[in-house]
């Protein structure tokens, strides 16, 4: 990997593309499709352009003590 590599969050790219399509007069439907599939596609696009798809570590860490997990799985 080159010493000076560029990084970008694939989730931000998905949001950027959504905003660009809206700006161009289109009406993208963010509710359709699989969000993970969109992120994977964004990651592939970034890699194809030589940019490393990167997400901040705190995004993946469970900083709320599993409150989100409990809400989704157990409904509390």
Image (spheres, rainbow, N blue to C red):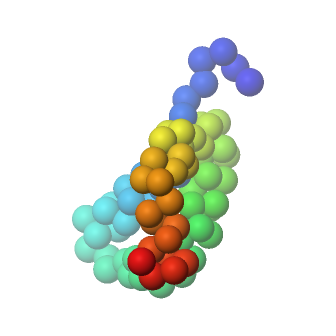
Which residue appears farthest toward the right when viewing the image? 1
Q: Residue at point 44% right, 63% down?
A: 67
Height in image: 45 above or below 49? Answer: below
Which residue appears farthest toward the top when viewing the image? 3
The image shows a total of numbered marks equal to 0
**Pick the front one: 14 or 21:** 14
Q: Residue 52 is drawn in which quadrant?
A: top right
Say left or right for 46 vs 28. right
Height in image: 64 above or below 50? Answer: below
Q: Residue at point 54% right, 34% down?
A: 7
* Residue 13 visible in the current orientation: no
In the rendered view of the protein, which quadrant contains the C terminus?
Answer: bottom left
**Pick the front one: 22 or 53:** 53
Q: Position of residue 31 (x, y in %)?
A: 42, 82
Q: Position of residue 25 (x, y in %)?
A: 26, 73
Q: Residue at point 55% right, 78% down?
A: 73
Q: Residue 6 is drawn in which quadrant?
A: top right
* Residue 27 visible in the current orientation: yes
Q: Position of residue 15 (x, y in %)?
A: 39, 59
In the rendered view of the protein, which quadrant contains the N terminus?
Answer: top right
């Amino acid at each position: 990997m080159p010493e000076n590599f560029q990084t970008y969050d694939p989730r931000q790219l998905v949001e950027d593309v959504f905003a660009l399509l809206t700006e161009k007069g289109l009406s993208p439907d963010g509710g359709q499709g699989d969000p993970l599939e969109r992120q994977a596609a964004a990651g592939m696009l970034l890699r194809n352009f030589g940019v490393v798809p990167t997400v901040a570590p705190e995004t993946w860490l469970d900083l709320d003590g599993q409150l989100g997990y409990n809400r989704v799985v157990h409904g509390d």
